């Protein structure tokens, strides 16, 4: 990982600590995992990685305990996040044209909730796969289960349904490696529930 990505992460983490519960783990997991599934000849990592690190930073401006499923909350954290993202990147003297693109993507990273299928947005298509897959990590699953107020098994089935909806709305797996990763995570969860 480039030094500049680490610097962005260092600037971002204190704000995530003030933001939504679970987001420090959310961001650290994405930062570690997303690059493993992306091809740097296909996707510009200088856009992708800052988007991954900064996308939910707007929750530091949203009152604690707000329901992240609420559409107004979604909009607000994207708008605020875009502003904070550009401030952080400007402070680090990140290339100006890249800042503009990162800001644009942060401001629409959750537009899937408004039906966007990211047809012309490869970075967001890839990113969105993992933003979703986070609910299959240990911390992410607990977070999602609490929001839903459901049992483990029902949460598992809800995730299955969520993936079906994603596909129906045109947000498919970015590549086969990600699809296999999803299947592996689901299998691990299933084994965890039934043993
Ligand atoms: Fe978000
Ligand atoms: Fe996220």
Image: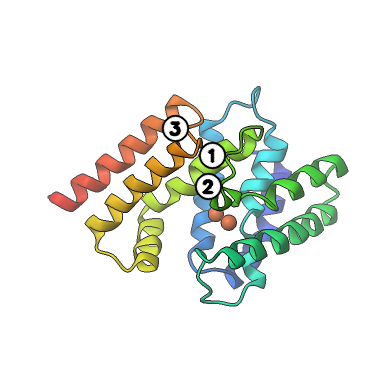
Is there a contact, CB below 8 Å, between mark 2 and mark 1? yes
Q: Is mark 3 within 8 Å of ligand 2?
A: no
Is there a contact, CB below 8 Å, between mark 1 and mark 3? no
Residue extending farthest top: 41
Is there a contact, CB below 8 Å, between mark 2 and mark 3? no
Q: Is residue 52 rendered to the left or right of residue 90?
A: left
Label 2 crowd (10 A; few <14 / some 14-19 / many >=20)? some
Per the rendering, the mark at residue 30 is 2
Instruction: Locate the N terminus by quadrant.
Output: top right
Residue at 71% in and 43% down: 3
Height in image: 25 above or below 61? Answer: above
Which residue, given by chain and number where applicable, does mark 3 sit on? 178
Label 1 crowd (10 A; few <14 / some 14-19 / many >=20)? some
Q: Is residue 87 rendered to the left or right of residue 152?
A: right
Q: Secondary structure at mark 3?
A: helix
Q: CA distance from mark 2 to mark 3?
A: 13 Å
Q: Is residue 75 rendered to the left or right of residue 23?
A: right
Q: Is residue 95 rendered to the left or right of residue 125?
A: right
Tally of marks: 3
């Amino acid at each position: 990982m480039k030094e500049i990505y680490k610097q962005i992460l260092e600037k971002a983490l204190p704000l995530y600590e003030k933001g939504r519960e679970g987001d420090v783990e959310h961001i650290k997991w994405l930062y570690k995992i997303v690059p493993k599934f992306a091809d740097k000849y296909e996707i510009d990592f200088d856009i992708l990685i800052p988007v991954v690190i900064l996308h939910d930073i707007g929750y530091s401006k949203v009152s604690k305990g707000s329901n992240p499923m609420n559409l107004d909350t979604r909009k607000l954290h994207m708008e605020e996040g875009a502003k904070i993202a550009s401030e952080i990147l400007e402070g680090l003297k990140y290339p100006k044209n890249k800042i503009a693109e990162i800001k644009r993507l942060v401001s629409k990273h959750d537009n899937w909730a408004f039906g966007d299928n990211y047809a012309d947005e490869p970075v967001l298509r890839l990113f969105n796969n993992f933003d979703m897959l986070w609910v299959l990590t240990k911390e992410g699953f607990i977070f999602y289960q609490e929001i839903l107020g459901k049992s483990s098994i029902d949460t598992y089935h809800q995730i299955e349904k969520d993936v079906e909806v994603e596909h129906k709305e045109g947000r498919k797996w970015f590549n086969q490696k990600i699809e296999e990763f999803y299947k592996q995570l689901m299998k691990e969860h299933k084994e965890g529930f039934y043993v």
